Amino acid sequence: MILLLDIGNTHTHLGLATAKGKLRRTLDLPTHNWFAGTGASDLDEFLAGDRVEAAALCSVVPDATPLATLAVQQICKVNPFELTSKTVRGVGIDYPKPQTIGPDRLANALAARHFFGAPAVVVDFGTAVTFDVLDRRGNYIGGIIAPGLNAMTDYLHEKTALLPKIEIRDIRAVVGKSTEQAMLIGAVRGYRGLVRELVKALRTALKARRLPVIATGGYAKLIASGLPEITAVCPHLTLEGLHIFYRHSAGGKTCE
């Protein structure tokens, strides 16, 4: 089995896949656990005794990377391949400072090119909402970053006296009849509008009549609902990109 770790600001997404890339199971654990000293035991429990032949990781939390790497080495007896702008294979980079690109964004781009071709756009609904763009040559050329849904609504709650903390969910109303409804409309419908407008602008900039737009991340399915601009919803796109990266790094084939 191949162990995959996507270390994000809030959560670390774990995946266990076959050599051909089929995900057998996944788990989200708080990234804080690596610093709290419980990450290794969480990983061991997740593996449930399965033998790990290799591992690949990407991380946007540099201080957590060595802690996760050590846990993998101790538990799995392998050294994980780390995806960075210097180690990525299978996608070009046309960007002024490649080292500043989040490795998870490169994993998304790698998976998008592999499964959908180029040009393509990945919209990742995580702590931030990120748009990652591949040109027609299959090069990562940059992207767009906006505040995440939770970040926006939590900020409104924390910085105002009367706005409540809300649970993000779909809403049919267009005019809010309560404070909660009004916030949900602004968040959910507002983000659909944001995605629609940015995809339109990207299609024009790329001069692309056909532009696959792949949504991933926690709120991908929610926001993509009723949004025809979204071509596909792939909840585990980053982990799939990591597996493709592993296969490149290990010298394996990248196509089934």
Image: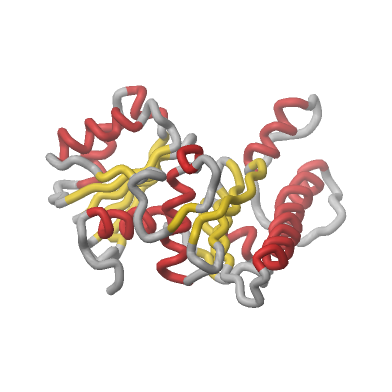
Q: Nearer the viewer, residue 234 or 30?
A: 234
Determine whether 70 is above or below 14 in the image. above
- Does residue 129 appear in the picture of this structure? yes
Residue drawn at (86%, 49%) of the image: 177
Q: Is residue 132 left or right of residue 29?
A: right
Query: Split into 4 quadrants, where in the image is the C terminus?
Result: bottom left
Residue drawn at (26%, 39%) of the image: 43
Query: Split into 4 quadrants, where in the image is the N terminus?
Result: bottom left
Residue drawn at (48%, 64%) of the image: 138
Q: What is the x, y in percent for residue 146? A: 66, 44
Q: What is the x, y in percent for residue 219? A: 58, 53
Quarter location, residue 171 = bottom right
Q: Nearer the viewer, residue 132 or 55?
A: 132
State how the image is colored: secondary structure
Point out the residue furthest to the top here.
36
Q: Nearer the viewer, residue 180 or 85?
A: 85
Q: What is the x, y in percent for residue 80? A: 23, 43
